Image: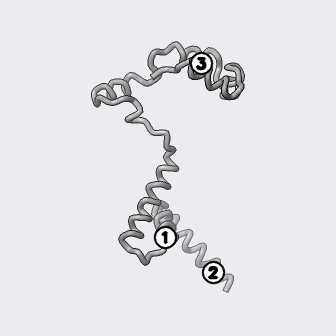
Amino acid sequence: MHIDTKKVKALLKARDLTLSELLERAGVSKTAYYHLVRKSNLLPRSIDRITTILGVGPRALLSDELPAVRKVRLREELVQQIQHDFPDVDADNVRHTLILLERPPLERLNGALRRGLATSVCS
């Protein structure tokens, strides 16, 4: 996997940018950019070896999904599964319960105590 300078130039032209403007905005020095352009493979050798043994391309191992987004997506899938298994359950209650279960027990207990105290003061 390497940088295709023709693709970079096309993207720059489409966005009406110069390479210098791009690098300045990205906070990347020209030296660093040209060093990356000259490399025949941007992936670490270990990744290259693993993909070779598995017989797949590097994209098979990589994900552009952020961990936080993945976490929310998996939680929503679990909410849907629980709703499927128990149709009368409220999705918001399930979601709230799952979020609370991700927190440490002491934090959950302290939150419950704060809410209890707030409720007793308001009554």
**Above or below 6: residue 67:** below
Give the structural element (helix, strand or loop) at label 1.
Answer: helix
Query: Which image quadrant for residue 8?
Result: top right
Q: In 3D space, how far apart are the residues under numbered discs 3 and 2 (Cα atoms)?
A: 58 Å
Of 101 and 57, nearer the camera is 57
Colour option used: one colour
The label shown at residue 119 is: 2
Look at 38% across and 74% down and name the residue there: 86
Q: Position of residue 40 (x, y in %)?
A: 45, 15
Of 109 and 13, nearer the camera is 13
Give the structural element (helix, strand or loop) at label 2.
Answer: helix
Q: Position of residue 82 (x, y in %)?
A: 39, 68
Residue tagged 1: 91
The label shown at residue 33 is: 3
Give the structural element (helix, strand or loop) at label 3.
Answer: helix
Q: Tell me which amino acid carries mark 1.
A: Ala
Q: Position of residue 78 (x, y in %)?
A: 41, 62
Q: Tell me which amino acid carries mark 2.
A: Thr
Query: Do residues under tags 3 and 2 come within 8 Å of each other at their CB atoms?
Result: no
Question: Horizontally, is 99 left or right of 33 in the view?
Answer: left
**Above or below 108: residue 3:** above
Task: Indicate which disc, 1 or 2, sits on the residue closer to the N terminus.
Answer: 1
